[in-house]
Structure formats: structure tokens, C-alpha cells
Image: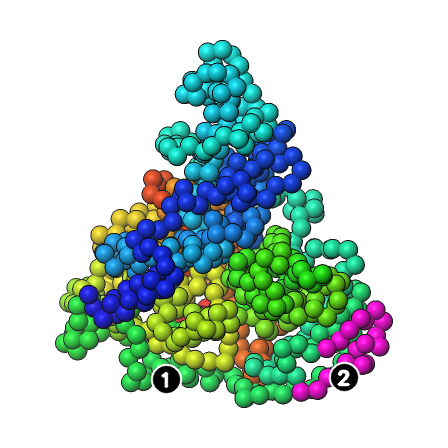
Amino acid sequence: MKRRGFLIAGGLLGGGVLLGVSLTTPPSARSRLGDKHSFPTSGEQVALNGWVKIMPDGRVIVASPRAEMGQGVHTALAMLVAEEMDADWASVSTEQAPVAQIYANTALLLNVLPFASDDDNLLARIARRSVQKVGYALSLQVTGGSSSVRDAWAPMRLAGATARAMLVDAASQAWGVAAETCRVRAGVVSHPASGRSIGFGELAAATAKIAPRSDVKLKNPSEFRLIGKPTARTDIPAKVNGSAEFGIDVKPGGLLFAAIRQCPVLGGKVLRFDASAAKAARGVADAFVIQDQAVVVVADRYWRAKSALEAQNVEWDEGPNAKLDSAQISAQLQAALTGSDNGSGFRSQGDADKALSQASRKLEATYSAPFLAHAAMEPINCTAQFKDGHLTVWCGTQVASLARWRAAKIAGLDSEQVTLHVPLLGGGFGRRLELDMIEQAVLIAIRTKGQPVKLIWSREEDMQHDMYRPAAMASFAAALDEQGQALAWLNRVAAPSIGLSTTERLLPAFAADSPDKNQIEGAFDLPYAIPHLSVRQLRVKTPVPVGSWRSVGHSYNAFFTEGFIDELAHAAGKGPLEYRRVLLAEKPRHRAVLELAAAKAGWGQALPAGRALGIAVHESFGSWCAQVAEVSVQDGQPRVHRVVCAIDCGVVVNPDTVEAQMQSAIVYGLSAALFGEITIKNGRIEQSNFPNYEVIRMAQMPVIEVHILPSSAPPGGVGEPGTPPIAPAVANALFALTGQRLRRLPLML
């Protein structure tokens, strides 16, 4: 075992011992079933376990432990339960699960482990089992990392199957027949021999008294009636008719509104603010400073609060970052790449340095990507009420357990004294993994003396006080043989540490500048068969707060690696498709999506004049995705006409959602590839709204085709894997068209 592996194992072992958990036994699906007390009931609802409730009229309510932020997770998770329960899908609905251990996301933490998905050595197995157990022990109820279905696949199916068995037992006891002679279909238990049948609702009360079986078996995939079938999302009707409630729609009685203005300079504070002038404005209830760096105005209407705040003259202590600009940060990244610090090794195979020193033919390149904002459609908001020693919070958050814990800490309460409601999210993309809006809303609610208050950030505040996708820079050096085949690959990636920045904000006691898989993912797990490989991470500290952005490190490392592999193909005089196919000979899932995308795009066939194709393939979050982009240049700017996407995400729960998520991920990544850039001048973020932070418009949208490979493998993620390949596919197409190699995002000719 190498030193790095020993340290990783030691850290996991130490954490496991401290928490008093078994390292080799991750939480089983059965241990996560909970009981009828886990899922709170009201009225005539009857809970059968921690995931399923039944109403007397036959309606089935499924607990959804993950936030619905447009990814269709409420529908997909309900399908898992309904399939095994044989419920009537038309009678199934979801309810946001409370904060409880059985709803912990045990799959999410697997994303931070520095192992490739197909790495099955002893250390990798121990690490995976350990983090699952640790995540469960800490009750981390998080939506992120494209992990919702992956985490729910076993426990939610088992919950449905267990509920089904209980219903059958209740019916068979009432009829005096053997349970195995009963059948279940569409919410009805029947006994074919006697012709008797009874609905779930009529059985609810009796079923609640039945002890759950311990020998329940899940369906064979050949028996699926719902899983794998295109299914309309359950949240769409309410979103179409306007009845859906997002965080910004919450309106408890007596609601006040709060507007906020934070120091425009990174790390700056409030120097002087005349609260009396703001308080004199119409409808204003209060005005004050919070956390030393923001001014808040509370009023009976949001527009009054915002207008009163904008009218005030706030003097700022700009602090040490008042001269910071983007050029300085780029220089930091460049200096890290060329400096003497060799960083942290994340991949070492063969001897890349020696192979490069002896090579007669080498290729070198440097790639870069800028900071990016999340730019979710729903601006940051949070509603809170602190009354009679109890705190109630309404917030579209991706981190329910941490949100409740942090809210309690700010208010000086125990977590049990906090009720958290998680409404629909108008986009998350990693931004709502943060707790800043919750901290601020609770501090404001403490001052409003029992009245609920809704904090809303303006779009400008949202854009200029984000936790940004890191700016990154990567250097490559490759050694080629006489046939142009790659012998060695040396990749150094310089970027701020996502893990350190996030931990400093959320769990500062655990913050440490240690190797960060999030920063280097998509680079260290290079799939190509190159004998000598070295991938190193250089963590660069900047004053800019960084965090998770859709597909995290994969979002820039895929652009870097798939761009450089295209350069190697060109240097070898080989086609980019064929060059990849040879290097992926031992990676069948990579090859399968690559070949499917190429075939469906008509690779090698004649194109209209002035157009070209580019290709890229990337694995992330347990799924394999390849994309082909068809591009042209119009008025000196890239124009993408068509994107063909092939995805292998294991067993598919809802093909309709998979297709929608690929389309969404491509649009999100394409906006970043063509336009996205956050720049800094005099310590301030220059972009403030969509006029100067462009996204793809309807008229610029390409045709998107999605092709899903059939698979019997366990489910992979689908929320993020479609984002990483799009930028390199477009860049590679532009090279094929113009001969100009674009190594910096956004792509500008």
C-alpha cells in the first residue's frame, strides 16, 4: 500500500473508530426501513414503515428524502416504492420526508473518494463501505452528487415490497387463506380462487397491526411494470397551473419581508450605516447590520424593503481584497503550475517523468476555465419564524440535516426545537448546498419577535455573492511514439480547493487543506490506456469563495482532458473517434456510449458546408456519457446546431426524466461553454444579472437527441453527467472546422 493510500485508509479508519461504527458493514436497506413512527401521520393517514403511508381512500403517500429542484426526483423515488408495492400509480403522491437518520444519503459521500468507479481493490472497498456507514451515522440528508436514485434504489424498493407483503398478510388473515395464494395489482389485493378482492385503503388500519416480514424479496427486473417506462412527472401539473409552492412562494400569516445588501468587496464589512433613515421609510419595521458585512431592511412588503435599502448610503470597510482582480488570480494559477511545489499526486502509473525525458516527440498545452455563478432561476431566499422558543424555517435547501442543525445553532436551540420545511427549489446546481441564507434569515427572525420574515436576495446580490465554480488551469505534457500513440501523460491541475472552501463555511472545525478529490475528479480517473500516467493536484488559495457547481470538478477537467486527447489524435494523424476507441479497448462502457453517439450523429458522413463535428466522452457520478456537437461559425461566433448524447446510467427508472436531465445538463454546460465567466475587478464581481452573465436563449438552442443504452447495472447518476462532455465536444468541433485550438473557456474565436 502506497503512502497516500495508507493515509486515506487511516483517516477513514480513524473516523470510523471515533464514531463507533463498523467499517465493513454499510447500512443495509433493511436497517433503513424505519417504522410507522418514522414518517409522521396526520388525520386518517396510516404509516406502514418510514417510507409509506396509506389513506382510507387508497391513496399512497411516499416519503421523499431528497429535494425536488427540477430533476424529477419526487417522481423517480415514488416509482421505486410503487413498483414493488404494486400500487395504483394514479393514487401515488409524495411528501417531503422529515429529518431522520433513515433518510441519510449514504451514496453521496462516495463521490468524494479518490477512486475510479471500476477500482475494486481492498482499500477502495473498505473506503466505500466506511463512508456509507459514516454518512448514515451522521444522518447527512443531502441532495447532490447525482445520488438520489443511487441511494434510494435498495431501501425504497424494499420499503414498497415490505408494505406490499404486510397488505397481503392483512388480507389473507381476514379471508383465512394462505398469503401465497393472494395477488396484488394496481392497489388491490385479490384472491383468485375465491374471487375476493380488497383495496389498499380498506386494508390500511388492519395492515398497521401486521408485523413486517424479514424475508421479503424484491422483484426481478423482468417483472417491472413501472420502472423503466416513460412516466409523466407528478410535479408538472402544479407547476403549469401555478399552484406549486417554491421557497419564494411561502406566505405564513403576518409575514414580513427582508431585503439585504452585502459588502460588494470580497471579505469586506460594514463601516457605517444610518439605520434611522431607513426606518423612516414607508412600511419599514426595522433596519440593522448582521454578521458585520450586510445591511438588512425589514418591511411589510418586499418592494418597500428593497427600495428603502437601495436609498441608503452605506459606507464599507473594503478590507484587504479591494485591489483583487481576475488577472492576479490567473497569475496565481499559472505560478502554481510552473512552480517548484509538486502538489498532491492523485494518479501515478509507470514513470511519466522518465518517459517524457526520454521521448523524442512531445506535446504540451495549457488549458483554463473561469469562475462561474450558479444562476438558478429562483433567487436565494429563506423564511423563518422564531416564536415561543421554537424556530420554524421554510427553505429550498439541498442539505436538510445541516440546515436544521445550523438554524438551531444560530438560534441557541436544540435541533428538536427546529421545524424545517423544504418546498420546491427553483434550481439548485449546488448553490443550495450552502447555509448562508438560513443563517441570515434566522438572525433576522430573532429580531422580528415572533413574526415570520422572508429574506429575499435580489438577482444582483445572488450573482455577486455566490459560492462560485472555481477558476482552474491545467498543464499537460505527453510523450508520443513514432506512430503517434501516447506513451506518457503528465497532467497538473491548479485550482482552489472546493472541499476546503465548503468545509470552512459549513463545518469549520473539520476544515483542513488536504487533498481534495472534488477539485481533481475527471482528471485523475483518466480512462485511456496510456502506460505512464501522472496526475497531480495543486490547491491555490484565493479570497473568492468556491463551492459545488453542477458536475463539480468534472465540469472543467473534462474540457481539459478531452481537449488534450483530441490534440494527441491530431498529432498522431488519427481521427478523434478512432484514436479514442483504441485507447478505450479495455473500457467497454466508455466505448459503447462513444460509438453510439458517433453512429447516431452520422460521424464520417457529409455535412452541410461550413459545419463540423466534435466528440467527447466522460464518466462521472456512476454514469458514462458521450456527446457529438455539430457546429458552425456565424458572425465570428460559435453556433451549435445539434448535440447527440448517449448515456449509460445503469438501470433506468424513468427514461423521460433521464432524457430531460441530459437536455438540461447540456443547456447548462453549453451556456457556460459559450458565455459563462465571472470576473473580478477591485475586489468586486463584475457581473450582476443576465444581461452581463449570458445564458443560452431560445433562438440559440441546438436540437438535442438523447440515446439511452440499456443496462442491468445498478443505477448511476443523471443530474450531472450530461454537463462535462459538452464544452470539449464543441471545442473539438470548432478545431475541426477552423483549425484553431481553443484551450480557454468560454470559447471565443
Residue for badge 2: 274
Question: Amino acid under label 2?
Answer: Asp
Q: CA distance from mark 1 to mark 2?
A: 44 Å
* Left or right placement of residue 261 versus residue 477 in this view: right
Percent position of residue 636, x then y: 50, 68
- For the point 28% across and 56% down, the residue is 126
Q: Amino acid at mark 1?
A: Ala
Residue 123 visible in image: yes
Left or right: where 513 falls relative to 291 = left
- 630 displayed left or right of 71: left
Q: Residue furthest top?
A: 194
Judged from the image, the secondary structure of the residue bearing numbered disc 1 is helix
Q: Position of residue 256 (x, y in %)?
A: 76, 63
Task: Choose between 680 and 424: the one closer to the eye.
Answer: 424
Which contiguous range is marked in magenta? 271-288
Q: Which image quarter holds the N terminus?
A: bottom left
User: Residue 719: x and y, percent?
Assistant: 47, 53
The answer to which image quadrant residue 312 occupies is bottom right
Counting other residues with Cα less than 10 Å from the Cα at mark 2, is it few (<14), some (14-19), or many (20 or more)?
Answer: few
Closer to the eye: label 1 or 2: 2
- Kindly state the secondary structure of the residue where label 2 is placed: loop
Q: Residue at x 26, y 48 (%)?
A: 588
In this view, 406 is above or below 279:
above
User: Which residue is label 1 attached to?
Assistant: 335
Q: Image height check: is 222 above or below 653?
A: above
Q: Earlier in the sequence, mark 1 or mark 2?
A: 2
Find out whether residue 564 is within the magenta segment.
Answer: no
* Relative to 511, 379 lies left or right: right
Q: How does the figure colour the protein chain or chains?
A: rainbow
Q: Position of residue 743 (x, y in %)?
A: 39, 71
Residue 283 falls inside the magenta stretch: yes
Residue located 60% across and 54% down the image: 422
